[in-house]
Image: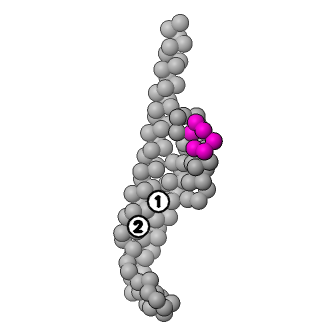
């Protein structure tokens, strides 16, 4: 009897650890997307020439902004895929599973 309780407790600890890992990746992805968006320099004007001039004058800022945003999307996708790999309350219904799959797909 004690063995079954220990196994049930171990699986709860394992599930909680997986949820924390997924949450970490989702939070990290959100932070990176926000930081990348804030760092993005202005420059999307009405004309293509004006936009290209802005990109040319702030090249490194544009590169860093897009790099951080891309890493943020990858971290969000990793968190969503991690959530989809095990059964929890967050993935208990078909609508929830579909939502997490769409986050992983479009990230």
Task: State the mark number for residue 60.
Answer: none
Image coordinates of residue 20 in percent, x first then y, are: 44, 39
Mark 1: give few (<14), some (14-19) or many (20+) Cα within 10 Å.
many
Can residue 56 be spotted in the picture? no
Q: At 57% across and 44% down in the image, what residue appears?
A: 96
Give the Cα distance between marks 2 and 1: 8 Å
Is 18 magenta? The answer is no
Image coordinates of residue 13 in percent, x first then y, are: 46, 27
Left or right? Give the position of 28 relative to 97. left
Q: Which residues are magenta?
A: 91-96
Q: At 50% across and 31% down in the image, what residue appears?
A: 15
The image shows residue 18, relative to residue 64, as above or below, that is above
Earlier along the polypeptide chain: callout 2 or callout 1? 2
Decide which of 70, 99 is in the foreground and name it: 99
**Residue position marked by numbered label 1 in the rendering:** 72
**Residue position marked by numbered label 2 in the rendering:** 36
Q: Secondary structure at mark 1?
A: helix
Colour convention:
one colour
Farthest residue to the top: give it. Answer: 1
Q: Are marks 2 and 1 in contact (CB under 8 Å)?
A: yes
């Amino acid at each position: 009897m004690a063995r079954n309780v220990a196994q049930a407790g171990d699986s709860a600890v394992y599930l909680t650890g997986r949820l924390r890992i997924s949450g970490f990746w989702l939070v990290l992805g959100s932070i990176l997307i926000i930081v990348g968006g804030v760092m993005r320099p202005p420059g999307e004007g009405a004309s293509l020439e004006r936009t290209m001039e802005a990109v040319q004058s702030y090249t490194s800022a544009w590169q860093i902004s897009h790099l951080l945003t891309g890493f943020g999307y990858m971290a969000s996708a990793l968190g969503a895929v991690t959530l989809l790999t095990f059964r929890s309350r967050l993935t208990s219904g078909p609508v929830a599973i579909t939502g997490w799959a769409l986050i992983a797909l479009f990230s």
